[in-house]
Image (tube, rainbow, N blue to C red):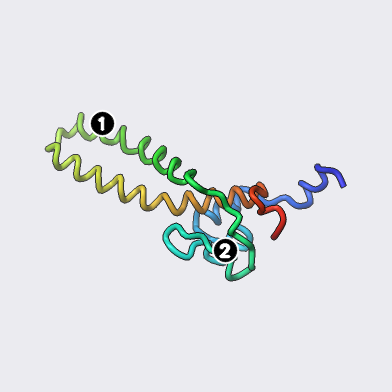
Amino acid sequence: MTYAALTDADDRPLRLALSRGWRRRCPNCGAGPMMSGYLKVRDHCPVCGQELMHHRADDGPAYLTILIVGHLMAPALLIAFVEFRPDPLLLGTIFSVGTVALSLYLLPRLKGALIGVQWAKRMHGFGASG
């Protein structure tokens, strides 16, 4: 069998895996929860049995979170300061809370999406099973 035939026959949809990962669900079945805690990934999907222990998310989700939050909050901070001129303590408090809240929201979702990409691309041992 050729490489092209293998990739066509065993294609895993990237968009679907990203969507399922963003929702913190198993990239294979979409039904089982991927996480057992805030950022702790299960070894296996409780529904379909897909091995999830192969993931290598490492620092990727943190870098992506910092990149996204920084690019959203920095211009918003500048606009708020220039247009409304609030008290610096109020401005700092509002943007600190907003930055932390957005970071806590994005971090597990980006980790799930990154694991979904690894599963769809058969990276780090995901090609052998499922």
Q: Is residue 49 above or below residue 27?
A: below
Disc number placed over residue 4 in the picture, else none: none
Q: Nearer the viewer, residue 11 or 108?
A: 108
Q: Residue furthest bottom?
A: 47
Residue in the picture at 22% in, 35% down: 80
The C terminus - image quarter: bottom right
Q: Is residue 29 shown above or below 5?
A: below
Q: Residue at x 47, y 44 (%)?
A: 59
Mark 1 secondary-structure assignment = helix
What secondary structure is marked by label 2? loop
Numbered badge on residue 43? 2
- Residue 78 — which label? 1
- Per the model, the C-alpha gap separating discs 1 and 2 is 44 Å
Q: Amino acid at mark 1?
A: Leu
Residue visible at 30% across and 45% down in the picture = 99
Of marks 1 and 2, which one's residue comes earlier in the chain? 2
- Circle 1 residues within 10 Å: few <14, some 14–19, many ≥20: few
Q: Position of residue 36 (x, y in %)?
A: 48, 65
Name which residue type carries label 2.
Asp
Q: Residues within 10 Å of mark 2 (few under 14, many from 20)?
A: some
Percent position (x, y) of residue 23?
50, 57
> Percent position (x, y) of residue 118?
61, 49
Of tags 1 and 2, the one toward the viewer is 2
